Image: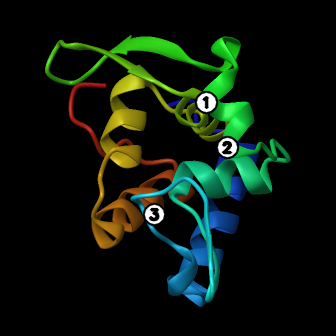
Amino acid sequence: MQSTPETRALAQQILDQITERPESHNQNHYIEHNSCGTTRCIAGWAAFFGESILTRDDIWNRPDLAGKYEGVDGQMLDYPGIFHIGMGLLGLTDKEAYDIFIDLDDVSATQKLKHIVVGEDWIHGN
């Protein structure tokens, strides 16, 4: 992880959002509009607060926003750009981004976000 004052401040802003408004956090969707408002995953909130506001069409239809990387199990994975945008904004390695963004458990992902806020590496061996 490349922890900087900017990455820690962004992580704190996301943590504040999902702590104060837990209904706005859903790791299953990078952005979803419903009758209760807008929910985002951690990568989605990073893009929102990092001023990388993108629509669903931007994410899924622009190959320059997509990328391949090696997942924790060694398998090559292809994810749309929101993954890479969040990874870059929060200063994460591929493995860290995979670990936090693909974690569909909101509570577990939030605990990992707390490590980013204080600049701690939570994945052994990075």
> Which amino acid, by three-letter code, is at mark 1?
Trp
How far apart marks 3 and 2 lie (CA) works out to 27 Å
Q: Quadrant of residue 88?
A: top right
Who is closer to the viewer here, 77 or 62? 62
Frontmost of labels 3 and 1 is: 1
Which residue, given by chain and number where applicable, does mark 1 sit on? 60
Give the Cα distance between marks 1 and 2. Answer: 6 Å
Q: Residue at x 30, y 58 (%)?
A: 104
* Quarter of the figure with residue 11: bottom right
Marker count (numbered):
3
Residue 90 x, y percent position in the rendering: 61, 41
Asked whether the beta carbons under mark 1 and mark 2 sit within 8 Å of each other, the answer is yes
Look at mark 3 in the image and give the residue it sits on: 114
Question: CA gap, disc 3 to disc 1?
Answer: 29 Å
- Identity, as a three-letter code, of the amino acid under mark 3: Lys
Nearer to the camera, 121 or 13: 13
Residue on which the image places disc 2: 56
Q: Are there few (<14), some (14-19), or many (20+) residues within 10 Å of tag 3? A: some
Which residue shows up at 66% across the image and 51% down it? 46
Q: Are marks 3 and 2 in contact (CB under 8 Å)?
A: no
**Residue at point 66%, 20% (across, down):** 65
| Residue 113 in the image: above or below residue 96 | below
Which numbered circle lies on residue 79?
none
